[in-house]
Amino acid sequence: MVRADALTIAGGIPGERLMENAGYAVADVICARFSQGTRAVVLCGAGNNGGDGFVIARVLKQRGFIVRVALALPEGMTVRDLKGDAAGAERAWRGETLPATPDLFDGAMVIVDALYGAGLSRDVTGRDAELIAAVNAARRRGVLVYAVDLPSGIDGRTGEVRGTAIVADETVTFFRRKPGHLLLPGRTHCGRMRLAQIGIAPDVLTEIAPMTAANGPALWADCWPEAAVDSHKYSRGAALVASGPLASCGAARLAAEATLRAGAGIVTVATPPDAVATVAAWRAALVVKPAADMAELATLLGEPRLRAAVLGPGLGLGDDVWQAIRAALEGDMALVLDADAITQASRRPEEAFALIKRRQAGLVFTPHEGEFQRLFPDIGGSKLDRTRAAAARSGAIVLLKGPDTVIAHPDGRAVINENGTAALATAGSGDVLAGIIGGLLAAGRPAFEATALAAWMHGEAGRIAGLGSLADEIASALRGVLAAGCPEFKAPMGEETGEDKVVATD
């Protein structure tokens, strides 16, 4: 974002104008809800975020609000030490400015958080932590809090709380959202998200070349699962899902149904003989083949018409299981390695990663946090950084599950999914996700785009199924996702991110 500002200013739009536009955008949002006479306190810091705050204060006062600025400066700094555009914004403010103290928020109906922006990279302590606590206490009393760019205390790169952080009712950010708006816990601090266009042209992204995106149709619209009228089951793609024995075959059944619904034309479930009848009774559309041991499973994985296989859900943790997984890794089909297959790979990561890097077809790991730690025990950092590092090390597409699922490609591209719901927090939901990915891979979709689309479809299926749904009902809800069709992608003005759009006015 710093680079986007710099390129815009170099292109002839002064930073003062960008700051004015940002301030007007936030003021417009507040004025759409509150009227003249509303008491507002604008909490300003020493940087450009504080400069935005001074603009907001000036505009609100011009529109009839009763406004005062609570200015929080580092120890030893005075208002005369403000620099650049922030200093100009402070000079243009003709209202009340007081040193920021917790009691200044008493009696306010609105608080504007312009203390820190998205660039915070240290923990908040001391007086600023006390101010944040006072803002949050006021919010609990019913005061509405509007954050400028990002709630103060949230790291814009990681979404982490740096010591303490404001919880906002609404957040207005500029040009494009930041990772901290999407990653937890930052997302839960933002409230309603709004995106303001303040004069930065989208073509600056060509030079910046960002590698992180919010998951949405811009990434995968061309991969939407549609079949030609003259297609047949094999042209749509054949997939195999490997099952464990009777006691654990439910996971593979869920994955197989999702694989079939998401795009595969024919799905075979390879299962030990004791589970054949149970799996066959699950869905008549599934082909069921017995595999008495891992050697027989490896033989079934050699079927030349297979385009994709899903390995891991309920498959088992015995040492012999690696025999079948290794055969699949040496084959030509695209693979999803989930659950037990991830644990198997974690026991021999160097061998697994070497086999993956020799493959031509795509491979996707789908770990939850515990499985990720087993497979990549020494990789730390933010969720975004960890997923990227894991993809680079393994040579696989890595999907790290959670309410803020992150998907990363070995080349550094990453997307953050944001449409997951609490309905997905149920046993078997991850098996459904693995199956959706498998179905899209069987239909011939590229692995990275297929994985991103699958995460979005999974979230939508959870939304349609609703709270209280079981995993098989989430799989069935894929019908509703597909019936609704691919959501429209609107490229201009940042609308691809799905948040409310604000255009600054003056």
Image (cartoon, rainbow, N blue to C red):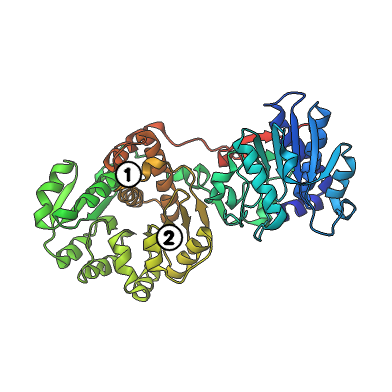
> Tag 1's secondary structure?
loop
User: Of the residues shown, which amino acid type is indicated by label 1?
Assistant: Gly
Q: Which label was assigned to residue 263? A: 1
The image quadrant of residue 113 is top right
Q: Which residue type carries mark 2? A: Ile
Q: Residue at x 62, y 38 (%)?
A: 139
Using the image, determine if residue 101 lies above or below residue 395: above
Q: Nearer the viewer, residue 401 or 415?
A: 401
Q: Which mark is residue 443?
A: none
Count of numbered badges drawn on the protein: 2
Query: Residue 450: x and y, percent?
Result: 41, 50
Pointer 1 or 2: first along the chain: 1
Residue 355 appears at what percent x and percent y?
A: 35, 72
Nearest the eye: 130 or 95: 130
Q: Position of residue 176 (x, y in %)?
A: 64, 46
Looking at the figure, which quarter contains the C terminus? top right
Could you give the CA–CA distance between mark 1 and mark 2, rounded to whole angstroms? 20 Å
State which mark lies toward you, 1 or 2: 2
User: Where residue 397 is drawn, which disc sits there?
Assistant: 2
Above-or-below relation of 40 to 103: above
Crowd class of label 1 (few under 14; some 14 to 19; many from 20; radius 10 Å):
many
Q: Is residue 263 above or below residue 158?
A: above
Does residue 200 appear in this view?
yes
SS class of the residue under badge 2?
strand
Other-residue count near label 2 (Cα within 10 Å), few / some / many at <14 / 14–19 / ≥20 = many
The structure residue drawn at horizontal position 23% and vertical position 66%, both measured from the top left corner, is: 317
- Mark yes or no: residue 361 visible: no
The reply to whether the C-beta atoms of the residues labelled 1 and 2 are less than 8 Å apart is no
- Where residue 293 sits, quadrant-wise, is bottom left
**Where is residue 251 shown, x and y percent of the image?**
24, 51
Q: Is residue 400 left or right of residue 315?
A: right
